[in-house]
Image: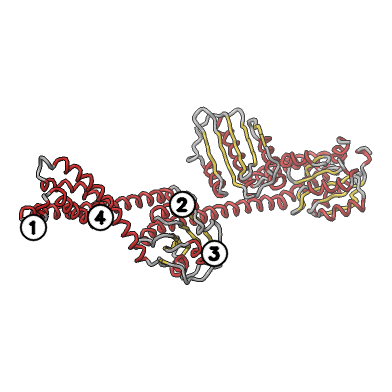
Amino acid sequence: MTTAGLALRVGAGRWLGGLLAGAVGVAAVTTVVALLEPSLPALGLLPLYLLAVLPVAVRWGAGPAAVVSVASTVLLGYLFLPSSRRLWFAEVDNAAATGVFLVTAVVVGNLAARLRRAAEHSARLSAEQAALRRVATQVAREAPPEEVFATVVGEIGRLLGADSAAIVRLDPDGLSTVIAQDGDGPERLPVGSRWSIEPPLALGVALRTGEPARRDGYEEVPGEFAELLRQVGVRSSVAIPVVAGGRTWGALGAQRRGTAFPADAEQRIAEFTEIVAIAIANAESRTQLAASRARIIAATDATRRRLERDLHDGAQQRLVSLALELRQVESAVPAQVRADLDRMAGDLTEALDELRELSRGIHPVVLSEGGLGPALRAIARRAQVPVELDVRTAERFPEPVEVAAYYVVSEAVTNTTKHGGASYVEVTLDAGANALALRVRDDGAGGADPARGSGLTGLRDRVEALGGSIHVTSPAGAGTTIEVSLPLAR
Amino acid sequence: MIGGMLRRCLIVDDNERFLAVARTSLERDGLEVVGTASTVADALDKADRLRPDVVLVDVALGAESGFDLTRQLVERHPDLRARVVLISTRREEDYADLIALSPAAGFVWKAQLSAGAVRELVAGRP
């Protein structure tokens, strides 16, 4: 069926509905007129028929309303004016009254119909604005892009009366991946599925040209995807490219089975694709930011590890051998020199210990060697307040995760000793299915401000660079609790 | 065998200067250094061939781990259980947990290494 044919059928439906409703209205008004007519002149009751005309005008438009007006006039004349005066409307008075009624009915009908169109338009606009606002709010609160995409296709499906809508991403290999979809018809594209979407499909055109595209009818379109659309009876498609960072990232498409999309569909979708583009750009910069943070931290950690190693292999190794040699010489020299040598050996041991302390602060070697359990127990042993450890995992984790967890505990224990006035610290470490959960709690003074404490800021950087989260609860007088979750890619 | 009868020793360390100093020190006190090794593979091979009474193992062997070597040594030579002594430039507290978990007799800080310290450790854990 052609688009014109469809429009005709819809138009016929509108007339039929309007005329039926008009008939019901006219019948009702006629009943009232019949009741009043004995005491009042029938022609004077003609304006009552406006009650039947107005609803038709509002609901079905000016055309059906005009027909109902004329029908009302004719009916009134036929039923209530004497049969001898079949040509009643030819009389001047009657003609004037009827004419005034008809003109009034048509003008009022037109106004009502226009009002209705304006109301419809405004309702549509406000629905669109509300939908745009919902999506924009999601973008503003940095919701994950998948969530934004799902909302967008849902809103578009609803606003345009689409049977299905989807967002696809154009991949480097030329195929397109479905990122979000709405609708449950058989033409829906499963999220994650990959397709070759080429012109003359609307989506294909949008992806290749970066311009909005539309297609009504799929009779002669080749390809697996067009075949699917044909099978399920999709008639009309519109597609708008999503341009992010100056290139066509993907496209948003909507399909309809029954009638073609309205002429302004592309323009209406475009407002959404702009927000989608912003969401994508935001997500990409967030990902890049996180990656660069992670790189900086990883580079720093690598440097610290190397520094510790160099100290160990170089200066420490040499001094340790020297100390051992001194002890040997000591036993072979006269007693008076021995005392001097002994003092020197003692100094050397102290220097070695200081060096050891320094390099332990640079990088905890026990962490790389034995993992979090032994490393946290080493912290607990050195701490100046009792540390209760509850380590519920003996697993090894990726180095950045172990290092982050280690520094969280080490920093928290240091803070507790320095400011907290705590009598003990409790550390709980547990490995879940997707994340490592760490909690450090003390019974100190509380009042730690994560915004001011540079130590806590450093921890936040570390944890967030790994995609994790850190929460500090520190009410004055009620201790401090630090809760950290570090994602594990298993 | 008791600690006093320890005579033959294998040292596993990747620092040549330390090996030389340690050899002099130990041998003067009657602990013969029958061999030295600087990698896990080399150490396992020498332990098989030389059958030492005691093995001194540096915790950090380049990229390899002295703890791993200790486990492997004891698996292959059960009589070496409590006859491996871990040594390091780092201090015992740096590795405390790992030392406790290993089948070694114990730990001696390299700066304090002596035949006496080794004998004491091995004798203390029959």
- Mark 2 and mark 1 residues within 8 Å of each other at the beta carbon: no
Q: Which residue is mark 2?
A: A148
Please give left or right for residue B49 compared with residue A76 in the image. right
Q: Nearer the viewer, residue A471 or B89?
A: A471
Q: Chain of mark 4?
A: A
Q: Identity of the amino acid at label 2?
A: Val
Nearer the N terminus, badge 2 or badge 4?
4
User: How far apart in space, not on screen, are marks 4 and 1 (Cα)?
Assistant: 30 Å
Q: Chain of mark 3?
A: A
Nearer the N terminus, badge 2 or badge 1?
1
Residue at horizontal 44%, vertical 52%? A154
- Secondary structure under the numbered disc 2 in the rendered image: helix
Q: Nearer the viewer, residue A192 or A72?
A: A72
Question: Same chain for marks 2 and 4?
Answer: yes
Q: Which residue is mark 4?
A: A61
Q: Identity of the amino acid at label 4?
A: Gly
- x, y (%) of residue A396? 69, 46
